[in-house]
Image (cartoon, grey):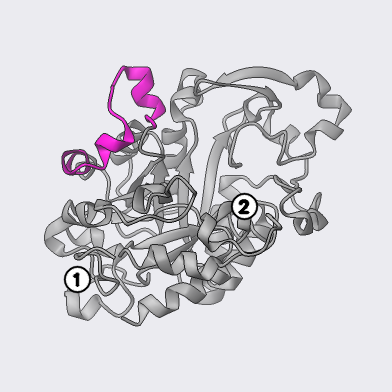
Amino acid sequence: MHKGQQPGRRTVLGAAALGAGAAVFGGAGQASAAGRAGVPQELPVPLIVGHRGASGYRPEHTFGSYQLALDMGADVIEQDLVPTKDGHLVCRHENDITATTDVSAHPEFADRKTTKTVDGVKLTGWFTEDFTLAELKTLRAKERIPGTRQHNTLYDGVWEVPTFEEVLRWAEREGRKRGRRVWLHIETKHPTYFRKLGLGLEERLAKALRAHGRHRKNSPNFLQSFEPSSIQRLDKLVDCPKVVLLSTLDSRPWDFTEAGDPRKVADLVKPEGLKWLAGFAQGIGPDLTVIIPRDKDGKLGEPTSVVKDAHAAGLVLHPYTVRNENSFLPADYRRGTDPNAYGDALGVFKAYLGTGIDGLFSDNPDTALLAAAEFRKR
């Protein structure tokens, strides 16, 4: 562990860094010490984000997955947003719904199968933007990776594809029931692609948040996107905290590609790039390899300076994604030869949390919370 990245560094955003609105990232019990009257401090640090819900145990982006993540104690629940043909926002990791719904079993939609290029990648299947909401509601969700998570196929067909509006109402109901606010981590998917189709995501998202009073600095949600321009657009529409997602170091955000911007993620995580991001975002969500790279054998290497540099720029870090199965873990944390069996996931969580990050996405919130508890005591 590098110096300056000690686990005890938990009060990561001072008032001078981002103003009172940034205090939503503070640890539990810090409100009086920080003296930030009226600013919510209910989130612990490090916080755990239920990645697409509790997708290690239920098909992703279903109310079964969201509810289980919340019941397990996840601090924040993630939604990915894509639009329907008639402009409704629905929760799917991708607009290609071939693997996550039973659409292929619906003969009435056979002629909707098509080939598209999304963010430079050619895909063949069925896409949300070719369906009205009413049509999409006739489908049922299923497990995306049944070969890895055969146990999740038990729940194939149980739940519909949820709309974002339904999720907002669910969060309000659960909040009233629990006597505390339910936090969401909301991503705009392929925003440049959809804007070209006349289905801009940001305005629709902002409208929904305003309708539910979730557009303020202290509102219980983070907004996230892999396209910095989407976050810049949202920054002009709503005041709630925003996170720029960052893929691997050698990748380039798709909106940069479209605009001819030569910068890559490697440039954005340098001090000057982080300073630029801090001009319109309160955090970054990097790929885990940006925090701790893997060596040529797939084993964890030494942490980079990104955590220290991002904190110096006033940004929090919510990297993604830790999963329990061997196939997703660094080589030195795998156990046995079955790629679908669990490895030393607790060890991996602790390795990443030990770098001083402020939160972590996981398909397995229960495992993540067990590891996080050790760091929240410091």
Q: Residue at x 58, y 63 (%)?
A: 364
Q: Residue at x 74, y 40 (%)?
A: 101
Is 83 or 94 nearer to us in this picture?
A: 94
Q: Which mark is residue 327?
A: 2
Mark 2, other Cα within 10 Å: few <14 / some 14–19 / many ≥20: some
Q: Residue at x 67, y 52 (%)?
A: 62
Please state which amino acid type lies under the numbered disc 1: Arg
Magenta-colored stretch includes residue 256: yes
Instruction: Please give left or right for residue 45 compared with residue 188 in the image.
Output: left
Q: Residue at x 69, y 45 (%)?
A: 161
Q: Where is residue 183 shown, x and y percent of the image?
A: 45, 61
Is 244 or 304 nearer to us in this picture?
A: 304
Q: Main secondary structure of the magenta part?
A: helix
Is 289 or 78 nearer to us in this picture?
A: 289
Q: Where is residue 338 shown, x and y percent of the image?
A: 71, 58
Q: Secondary structure at mark 1?
A: loop
Q: Where is residue 260 shown, x and y percent of the image?
A: 31, 17
Q: Which residues are magenta?
A: 251-276
Q: Where is residue 363 shown, x and y percent of the image?
A: 58, 58
Q: Going by the picture, which residue comes out furthest to the left?
A: 16
Residue 173 higher or lower than 247, as above or below = below
Instruction: Please give left or right for residue 105 compared with residue 91 in the image.
Output: right
Quadrant housing the C terminus = bottom left
Check disc 1 and report the residue beneath it.
36
Residue 50 higher or lower than 11, as above or below = above
Magenta-colored stretch includes residue 269: yes
Please state which amino acid type lies under the numbered disc 2: Ser
